[in-house]
Image: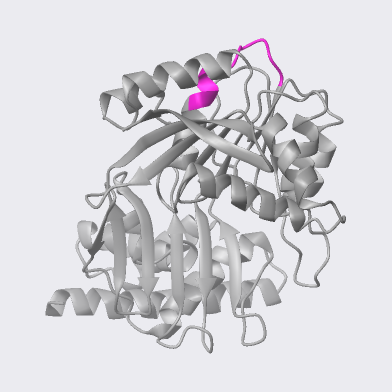
Amino acid sequence: MNPVGRHISTLTEQLRERLAAERRAVAAAGGPEPPIAEAIADLVEREAAVLSAGRREELARLVHRETVGLGPLEELLADPLVEEVMVNGCEAVYVERRGRIELTDVRFPDERAVRETIERILAPTGRRVDELSPMADARLADGSRVNVVIPPLAVDGPVISIRRFAVDRPGPAELERTGSLAPEAREILERAVRERRTILVSGGTGSGKTTLLNALSAWIDPRERIITIEDAAELRLRQPHVVRLESRPPSIEGRGEVTIRDLLRNALRMRPDRIVIGEVRGPEALDLLTALNTGHEGALSTVHANSPEDSLRRLETLALMADVGLPHLAVREQLARGVDLIAQLRREPGGERRVVEVSEVVAAAGGVAVRSLWAL
């Protein structure tokens, strides 16, 4: 950092601390606190009047960023191409653009600055991290998912992972244009959605499962009532009749948790035409299979798995986690009758995400199997 940059950084920190002290004093005296932007502008005018108007404007922006924003991460989150931000301590910040991970030149001055950023992320959610609870999940105002881990679990300093979600999800035509969805696969999936067949989107982390799930929803009849269930509200369905449900983690006291399973059970009482689950990752798999076998057809969901065969095995394992004593054969029979198609996604070494197989779920001797309808 050049001398001017170091001076601005030092001045920013000094003004931020003075701003905090002044606002604490006003709050202690019981007086009304001015809006934060107004307070920052007044402070910069008083304490940095010798600087040019442009420098004062930049200084005010930096103080605001360090006071209520996400510090150095703000400039990364302002880039629409950034899909993920990964902070590994105070000196290593990576981003993912177009499926490729890159090291940035963004740095935090010290570990305390990273911890303060974490506190600003968690404060609106009512959560916190400390040595007793060193991990937490949260969500930014734009819907981005955040995970934080601090020492002693994070050995080399606090770690922040921010998974961003585009406001506008690409539709089937755009996925086909970019090569993510082959025309033959598109025809099979479109017909399946319109015929109200249940589709499971399978793939690894970052393979584009939610993006494909959102695209598949474009073929749902706009007259249908759709209920979406997610851990973090990522889906952007364009139909007029959509009810969005989002799970809730427990509070600091360990109360108030609402799981995907709770929401799924409640959704069945809400007269859904379609149920769209962002991801099946726990015992809610059994409730989903039960719903699919009792008239709630045409559901869409995703699961982490490396192949269509693995996705069925994973769904079976998750259903058994419900611990209701069902034999394996009963779960497999429900799988065979409830799930119709599996769309398998793969993330290529270059970062491209593609549908590589569409398979049909069929009953087989002793359980359930898949039959490939199309493969890349």
- The foreground one among 124 and 244 is 244
Find residue 239 and report its image quarter: top right
Say which quadrant the C terminus sits in.
top left
Please state the horizontal and vertical placement of residue 332, each as a whole percent of the image.
Answer: 71, 43
Residue 271 in sight in this render: yes
Residue 279: image x %, image y %?
A: 60, 45
Q: State the residue in front, 231 or 80.
A: 231
Find residue 362 and report its image quarter. Answer: top right
Q: Position of residue 266 (x, y in %)?
A: 84, 38
The range drawn in magenta is 216-225
> In this picture, is 302 found above or below 270?
below
Q: Residue at x 50, y 51 (%)?
A: 305
Q: Residue at x 43, y 74 (%)?
A: 16
- Main SS type for the magenta part? loop
- Residue at 61% from the left image edge and 28% from the top image edge: 340
Quadrant containing the N terminus is bottom left
Magenta segment: does it hold 295?
no
